[in-house]
């Protein structure tokens, strides 16, 4: 069964910030980041239980090649992406604030 994916506004803002950062550092790399994001969203839609719980009831998918994690939770047949964080950030501290 395919799950519906909802990207919460905070996560959308995170993705926009990350894209801008990559565009400045190395133009074109932001497109590779978006491609990885799309791949991860496809995986989540197909099998959201694939990734482990990282914080309370939140699961996280780790981006290949990019040092980011997308945190999400599952409710019935829907996956909610709540934030995208840099791996070097203090995950627990940031998630408590969101």
Image (cartoon, helix red, strand yellow):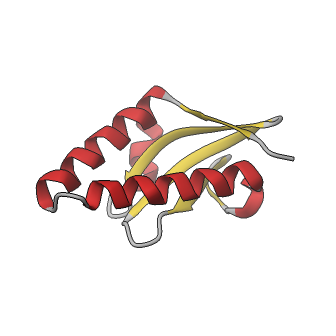
Above or below: residue 88 compared with residue 6:
below
Q: Give percent across and percent down for residue 4.
A: 72, 36
Query: Residue 37 versus residue 13: which sits nearer the camera?
Result: 37
Above or below: residue 74 compared with residue 35:
above
Q: Quadrant of residue 5?
A: top right
Q: Give percent across and percent down for residue 61.
A: 57, 59
Residue appearing at x 37%, y 58% in the figure:
33
Horizontally, residue 15 falls left or right of residue 54, namely: left
Residue appearing at x 48%, y 53% in the figure:
37
Residue appearing at x 41%, y 52% in the figure:
34
Q: Give percent across and percent down for residue 53.
A: 66, 57
Residue at the top extreme of this rendering: 9
Whether residue 66 is visible, yes or no, is yes
Horizontally, residue 73 falls left or right of residue 10, namely: right
Horizontally, residue 27 falls left or right of residue 34, namely: left
Residue at the bottom extreme of this rendering: 65
- The C terminus lies in quadrant: top left
Q: Give percent across and percent down for residue 13.
A: 35, 33
């Amino acid at each position: 069964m395919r799950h519906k994916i909802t990207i919460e506004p905070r996560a959308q803002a995170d993705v926009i910030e990350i894209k801008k950062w990559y565009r400045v550092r190395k133009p074109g790399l932001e497109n590779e980041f978006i491609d990885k994001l799309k791949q991860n969203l496809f995986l989540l839609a197909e099998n959201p239980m694939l990734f482990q719980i990282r914080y309370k009831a939140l699961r996280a998918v780790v981006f290949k090649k990019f040092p980011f994690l997308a945190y999400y939770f599952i409710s019935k047949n829907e996956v909610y992406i709540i934030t995208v964080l840099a791996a070097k950030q203090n995950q627990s501290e940031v998630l408590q604030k969101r």
